[in-house]
Amino acid sequence: GTATSYESSHGKGGCNVLVNHSKGGTGFVGKVLIEKLLRSCPDISTIYLLIRSKKDKCPKSRLDEMFKTPVSISKRTSKHDLFDRVKKEVPNFRKKIVPIIGNLVIEDFGLSESDNNTLINQVSIIFHLAANVRFNENIKSSTIINVNATATILKLAKHMPNLKSFIHVSTAYANCHVEHIEERFYSYPINHKDLI
């Protein structure tokens, strides 16, 4: 994987990862990615998770919940603790997880100056998983999460001197008006900024 390749070519440690997800890494894909990174890439120094602030829960309690809540891979399988194996193999894994308070719908994610500087100076790999996958969502909400959040993380990434890899995960329905989708940029009759 990307983190493993980075470690082998750049020596032990020093690999700091940002996971940017609409549910703050606490959604299904974010959880699976975090578990895989912790288990397969033991030399990752830090995984920064962008997490929304909630009135009733501090970031630490949201992380506690994420690591305790069982998940089901499919509707046919029973729920299990996704992090059981990591807890056994990497007992100090929680020290590697750093929550960063932010919100994808706020300008510049509402990051504090300190957090913004930390990410700029420390991150070497970004996993951008943020997307709204409710296909009946109104166009304004979908655009803010799916397009603006991507533009914001790219703007932040441009300032990261140690950035080696940017991985973007998107929905499967991009360019659905085209029968055969090529790997190229498509032009559209409307600018995304006009949608909001």
Image (cartoon, rainbow, N blue to C red):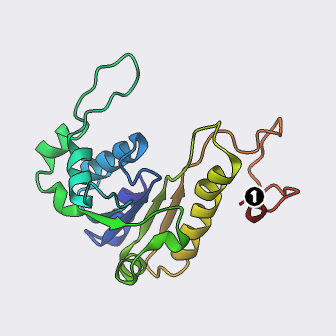
The correct choice, above or below, for 148 with respect to 68 in the image is below
Nearest the viewer among 37 and 171 is: 171
Residue sitting at the far top? 76
At horizontal 18% and vertical 55% (from top left) the residue drawn is 93
Image quadrant assignment for residue 21: bottom left
x, y (%) of residue 167? 52, 57
Image quadrant assignment for residue 107: bottom right
Disc 1 crowd rating (10 Å Cα; few below 14, some 14-19, many 20+) is few
Image quadrant assignment for residue 52: bottom left
x, y (%) of residue 180? 81, 37
The reply, left or right, for residue 1 in relation to residue 58 is right
The reply, left or right, for residue 142 in relation to residue 179 is left
At horizontal 34% and vertical 27% (from top left) the residue drawn is 72
Residue sitting at the far front? 55
State which quarter of the image contains the C terminus. bottom right
The correct choice, above or below, for 94 with respect to 139 in the image is below
Question: Badge 1 is on which residue?
Answer: 195
The reply, left or right, for residue 162 in relation to residue 175 is left
Please state which amino acid type lies under the numbered disc 1. Answer: Leu
At horizontal 58% and vertical 55% (from top left) the residue drawn is 145
Nearest the viewer among 32 and 12 is: 32
At horizontal 24% and vertical 28% (from top left) the residue drawn is 80
Label 1 SS:
helix
x, y (%) of residue 185? 77, 57
x, y (%) of residue 14? 29, 72
